Image (tube, rainbow, N blue to C red):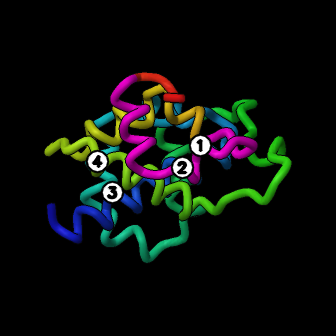
Amino acid sequence: MTEKLKNDIFYVCTLIEYTARKTKNRRCDVVKMIGKEEIARQLRAAEVNHCLSLAQVSDELAEDFHIPDGNFDTVSECRYEVPSVHSIGKVYQRLVLATGSTDAAQAIMNVFASFISDEISDFNTNVYYSNPDYLRCCYEEGMLLA
């Protein structure tokens, strides 16, 4: 996998995280609303779009795909310092890369649509800063491991 593709995956994961926070939706709902085709398009456009603000690209995504405001607000419910969208984008990027998939758009869909996404999004737990190998194993097993 090229460095460019790794960076593009990071950008798209960060964009999904940003959009989900902004619209107060579960990350799995955002990827379901935009779909694999749009994720693939965002991967192709990432090299250009990263020069734009996340807010602008996120607004366009929410408008184009009619992403409604939800009530999954992980930021205001956080009792601690909220991790940046870039930090969480990196967590997702590592997990997507760890799947070993050759289809980056599908891997992004799969990771964000899995149970682990809500666990990572709960900033009152330690899941989001857990060891990447632990997150991969949990993802593969379909549950948090003891």
Q: Are marks 1 and 3 in contact (CB under 8 Å)?
A: no
Q: CA distance from mark 2 to mark 4?
A: 14 Å
Instruction: Name the N-terminal-most of marks 2 and 4.
Output: 4
Name the residue rendered at 20%, 44% in the picture.
100
Instruction: Name the N-terminal-most of marks 3 and 4.
Output: 3
Residue named by callout 4: 98
On the question of residue 48 being in view, the answer is yes
The relative height of residue 146 versus residue 46 in the rendered view (above or below) is above
- Picture quadrant where residue 139 is located: top left
The circle on residue 85 is none
Residue 131 on the magenta span: yes
Q: Which residues are magenta?
A: 121-141
| Residue type at the position of mark 2 | Ser
SS state under label 4: helix
SS state under label 1: helix
Q: Position of residue 73 (x, y in %)?
A: 75, 39
The circle on residue 127 is 1
- Looking at the picture, tell me which residue is in the foreground, 48 or 11: 11
- Looking at the picture, tell me which residue is in the foreground, 22 or 68: 22
Residue named by callout 2: 130
Q: Residues within 10 Å of mark 4 (few under 14, many from 20)?
A: some
Q: Main secondary structure of the magenta part?
A: helix
Q: Are marks 4 and 1 in contact (CB under 8 Å)?
A: no
Q: Are marks 2 and 1 in contact (CB under 8 Å)?
A: yes
| Residue type at the position of mark 4 | Ala
Q: CA distance from mark 2 to mark 1?
A: 5 Å
